[in-house]
Image (tube, helix red, strand yellow):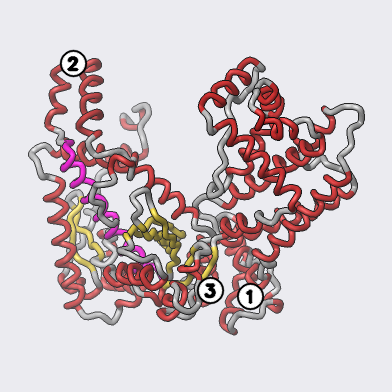
């Protein structure tokens, strides 16, 4: 009775107080289990099996031949026929790697100091700053903060943390090697993988090849940085393939698992005879070769009527005139300040930057009154031709339209960027843009400009029922139609035969023409399974198809091949930006190692 009167007694406490009637049975490891690819490890005083292939820990209750065999057959089906000697070698390698990790983690007497050194080194690596920043800035700052908060005695404890330039480099190399080993193991364990490749030259005039990989892992699709390798001399397709193939061979990654390669439109990448595509296709003819959708969008947007192109060139020249001279830039800033402008400076145009045109044109049109005032106060004769534009109503309406249309293009570009985008999401966004162009064309014909906010606001602010000049209206219609045609030429209509991948429960199998008999039957079985339909609503497409792979292998693999494909080379472009930032002009003589 006393026990029941105790307040706030948890269920676990009650269980602990009950007399035990039987001991929990702890199973012991047998050397025979090595035939199933399992070795032994002790965790928290309990002996548990550990897979020598994927390093996964199993529970003590799983230490039964049937359950251990199930792990091998489910996770490593391709190794079921391997002998016990093969797994013994793998167990030895696992044991050796554990010793190496222990040695690395306990290099000094103070394990906490070593851990702190690794954690700080990781932050330095992520920041892209020189390794010396740890010893020259981070450690002194840490000492100051600890001394102020906890006293000088606590501050002196930080002296045991090694953060020298060479130590930070060693720590980063250790972590990099460990991450690479894990990544290679994950790629090998995946049924398929896809690559994203790009080549570029950095500020040191060194040519680099970057690669990202997408693969299945832990019931989802993962994408990770694979390598950055220098190209010794030429950047031909053959030279690029040699570097790529050597990396794949070194890591024992086979080409037969590669389902897709995504690159930009460079000739060295996409040629079908002597370039990279031709060499890769020789290794695996079924590989899908994909052109980056962001580059395709940028190329499609280059199609522009002469009149609008001339206005765009005028806008760029205006910006260059003001920004190229420090005095002009300062005077313009003062004018903007006096007129109460939100922005005080113009933006320079760079053709290689995806969002440049939209931002430059929008800023010029926003500051058109300030620019006009600047030219009126400037006595240089060469500015008169620029000043005349800002008194030309027709020119200003075309500038307003360009600001609107390039802003819409920027929105599309941003939508195509980012991680974890699949080809179906990108196709939807491109189709949306094409339909918008068609709608905007019809509305412009009807003299409805509400879809162009800057143009519409400018016409309203002009007063007196200002109307868009007919010749400007014709130029806008011509431009919208040209863009629609260009986008369609770069992005053909989506293949409806692949819609089942995105939604297998809204598909008529009889309309699909490119599936095998087994795949068709499995798709029908999935379509009729109400449990799977509920699961599909609660998960992503990739997770759904990976989770059904055991029961519907053929159709799952077909879906996965298309979901793995990179729709853009955004990750490579972002990595190049990080590389340029890291390789600053003061570090160009540093010996860089491939990663």
- Judge whether residue 174 is colored magenta: yes
Q: Quadrant of the C terminus?
A: bottom left
Q: Earlier in the sequence, mark 2 or mark 1?
A: 2
Residue 113 falls in image quadrant:
top left
**What residue is shown with label 1?**
524
Residue 205 lies, in percent from the top left, at 35, 53
Tag nearer the camera, 2 or 1: 2
Q: Assign a secondary structure to mark 1.
A: helix
User: Which range of residues does the magenta coloring cover?
Assistant: 163-191
Which comes before the other along the chain, label 1 or label 3?
A: 1
* Marks 2 & 1, CB-CB < 8 Å contact: no
Q: Which image quadrant is residue 138 in?
A: top left
Of the image marks 2 and 3, the number of the one nearer the N terminus: 2
Give the structural element (helix, strand or loop) at label 3.
helix
Quadrant location of the N terminus in the rendered image: top left
Chief secondary structure of the magenta portion: helix
Q: Residue at x 24, y 39 (%)?
A: 131
Spatial separation of the CA atoms under disc 2 and disc 1: 71 Å
Looking at the rendered image, the disc whose residue lies closer to the viewer, 1 or 3, is: 3
Between 203 and 23, the residue placed more toward the observer is 203
Q: Is residue 581 above or below residue 575?
A: above
Q: Position of residue 398 (x, y in %)?
A: 77, 41
Does residue 316 appear left or right of residue 465 in this picture? left
The residue labelled by disc 3 is 558
**Residue that label 2 marks:** 151
Please identify the quarter of the rendering in which residue 126 is found: top left
Front-most of residues 226 and 307: 307
Is residue 579 highlighted in magenta?
A: no
Gap between marks 1 and 3, in whole Å?
15 Å
């Amino acid at each position: 009775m006393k026990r029941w009167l105790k307040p706030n007694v948890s269920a676990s406490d009650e269980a602990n107080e009950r007399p035990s009637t039987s001991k929990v049975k702890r199973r012991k490891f047998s050397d025979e289990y090595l035939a199933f690819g399992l070795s032994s490890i002790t965790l928290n005083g309990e002996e548990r099996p550990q897979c020598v292939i994927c390093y996964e820990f199993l529970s003590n209750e799983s230490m039964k031949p049937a359950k251990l065999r199930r792990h091998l057959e489910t996770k490593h089906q391709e190794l079921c026929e391997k002998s016990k000697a093969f797994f013994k070698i793998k167990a030895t390698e696992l044991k050796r790697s554990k010793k190496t990790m222990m040695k690395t983690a306990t290099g000094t007497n103070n394990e906490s100091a070593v851990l702190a050194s690794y954690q700080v080194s990781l932050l330095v690596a992520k920041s892209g700053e020189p390794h010396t920043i740890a010893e020259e800035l981070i450690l002194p700052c840490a000492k100051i903060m600890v001394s102020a908060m906890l006293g000088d005695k606590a501050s002196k404890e930080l002296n045991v943390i090694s953060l020298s330039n060479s130590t930070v480099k060693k720590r980063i190399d250790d972590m990099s090697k460990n991450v690479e080993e894990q990544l290679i193991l994950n790629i090998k364990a995946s049924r398929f993988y896809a690559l994203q490749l790009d080549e570029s030259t950095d500020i040191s005039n060194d040519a680099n090849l970057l690669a990202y990989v997408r693969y299945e892992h832990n019931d989802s699709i993962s994408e990770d940085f694979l390598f950055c390798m220098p190209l010794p001399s030429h950047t031909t397709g053959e030279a690029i393939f040699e570097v790529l193939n050597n990396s794949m061979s070194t890591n024992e990654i086979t080409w037969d698992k590669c389902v897709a390669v995504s690159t930009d439109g460079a000739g060295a990448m996409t040629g079908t005879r002597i370039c990279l595509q031709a060499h890769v296709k020789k290794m695996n003819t079924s590989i899908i070769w994909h052109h980056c959708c962001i580059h395709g969008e940028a190329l499609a947007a280059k199609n522009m009527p002469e009149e609008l192109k001339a206005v765009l060139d005028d806008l760029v020249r205006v910006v260059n005139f003001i920004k190229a001279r420090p005095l002009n830039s300062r005077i313009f800033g003062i004018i903007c300040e006096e007129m109460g402008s939100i922005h005080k400076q113009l933006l320079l145009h760079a053709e290689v930057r995806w969002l440049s045109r939209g931002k430059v044109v929008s800023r010029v049109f926003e500051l058109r009154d300030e620019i006009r005032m600047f030219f009126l106060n400037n006595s240089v004769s060469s500015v008169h031709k620029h000043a005349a534009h800002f008194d030309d109503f027709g020119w200003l309406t075309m500038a307003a339209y360009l600001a609107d249309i390039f802003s819409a293009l920027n929105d599309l570009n941003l939508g195509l960027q980012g991680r974890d985008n699949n080809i179906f999401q990108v196709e939807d966004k491109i189709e949306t843009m094409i339909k918008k162009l068609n709608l905007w064309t019809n509305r412009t014909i009807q003299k409805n400009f509400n879809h162009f906010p800057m143009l519409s606001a400018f016409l309203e602010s002009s007063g007196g029922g200002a109307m868009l000049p007919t010749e400007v209206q014709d130029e806008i219609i011509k431009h919208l139609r040209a863009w629609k045609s260009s986008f369609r030429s770069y992005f053909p209509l989506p293949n409806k035969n692949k819609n089942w991948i995105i939604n297998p429960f809204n598909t008529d199998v009889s309309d699909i023409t490119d599936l095998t008999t087994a795949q068709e039957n499995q798709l029908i079985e999935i379509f009729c399974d109400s449990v799977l339909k509920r699961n599909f609503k609660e998960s992503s497409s990739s997770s759904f198809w990976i989770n059904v792979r055991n029961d519907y292998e053929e159709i799952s693999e077909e879906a996965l091949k298309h979901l793995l494909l990179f729709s853009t080379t955004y990750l490579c472009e972002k990595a190049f930006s990080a590389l340029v930032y890291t390789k600053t002009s003061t570090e160009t003589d540093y010996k860089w190692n491939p990663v």
